[in-house]
Amino acid sequence: MPVPTIEWKQNKVKIIDQSALPAKMRFIYCASAQSIWNIIKYMKIRGAPAIGIAAAFGVYLGVRNSTNKNFAKDLSKTINYLATSRPTAVNLFWALERMGKIARKHKGEPVTKTKKILLKEAKNLLNEDKAICRKMGKFGSALIKSKDNILTHCNAGGLATADYGTALGVIFAAHSQKKKIKVYADETRPVLQGARLTAWELMREGVDATLICDNTAASLMASGKIDKIIVGADRIAGNGDTANKIGTYNLAVLAHHHKVPFYVVAPTSTIDTKIKTGKAIPIEERNPDEVRKIKNIYVSPRNVKVFNPAFDVTPNRFITAIITEKGILRKPFLRSIRKACAN
Ligand code: MRU
């Protein structure tokens, strides 16, 4: 059963509150652009494709009560506002751009019609993501052998997308093909997406899952227990440099040292061809209390200085291949990415 990460229900956006998982399955209903901004900013919904979909619905919610006179102004205000929710995952900006573009295409037509078109476009984005995840799953699962031990980081599952996942989509596809795989999930400090969400999703699907502390990965690789690393992405530069959850770069360097293939799974909407290298990817810094506290309890001096970047950039040379809905992209990435993004 796919996870219903985000749905359009009763004229509202219904999402699973990911901050409550796995202890509680709680839902949040959003009826305004502001509430969409909040769920993205405070990570009630997270994961690059999922926040893009939420933002697309947010655009519709921001203009649904606009009058003819205010529509254009409200539209650009809503788009600019939602763009301030989180900076790294390019899917957010990609989705906002797509919504803006379709509205502009219908400029001059009655706004009631444009509003309907915007809602339809947000629903299209949601449904397309479901199909894209399954395509990536199909391509990526061809790389997985029975008895593979796979390591993943953060949550690139159904919860990070419309419903199936990028990195976990590949794992789910391999599992459904009856390949006997074992998956190690990094806990992923400080927000614990691996412990809270990935472990939950894997177990829900009956995948053999083992949770590890982030600092266990090196010794597992050294003892030959990892055959592949599969992660998602938040933004991929034109040369293949990849921003993903903080700690991904550590894994990539370790994988290189231990000769373990390192795969990134992401839709082409995660590729930002406007930027040439990972150096131009903006990295979000989050609230220091995420590091000072675990489950709302301080585990450090309350006023200790903290550095809390949410993402890091893995240089392209450490990436074996990038699995997209267009196929598996190999080096040189500059060329394979350009080709995949051309049509
Ligand atoms: O801060 P988050 O939880 O939004 O970060 C999510 C990740 O880094 C995921 O690995 C990435 O978005 C890929 S999701 C399919």
Image (cartoon, grey):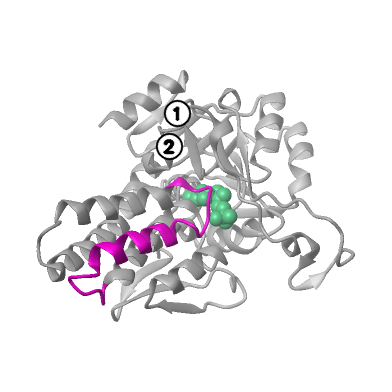
Q: Residue 46's x, y, as percent?
A: 52, 60
Toward the viewer: 87 or 229?
Answer: 87
| Magenta region | 64-90
Q: Quadrant of residue 221?
A: top right
Q: Can residue 69 be found in the magenta stretch?
A: yes
Report if the CB atoms under discs 2 and 1 are less than 8 Å apart.
yes
Which residue is drawn at the image coordinates 66% and 46% (left, top)? 246
Q: Residue furthest right?
A: 301
Q: Can residue 238 be found in the magenta stretch?
A: no
Residue with the mark numbered 2:
272
Q: Residue furthest left?
A: 109
Which residue is drawn at the image coordinates 52% and 28% (left, top)? 277
Q: Considering only vertical position in the picture, is 109 above or below 7? A: above
> Does 168 sit left or right of 71 as displayed?
right
Residue with the mark numbered 1:
238
Q: Residue furthest front?
A: 69
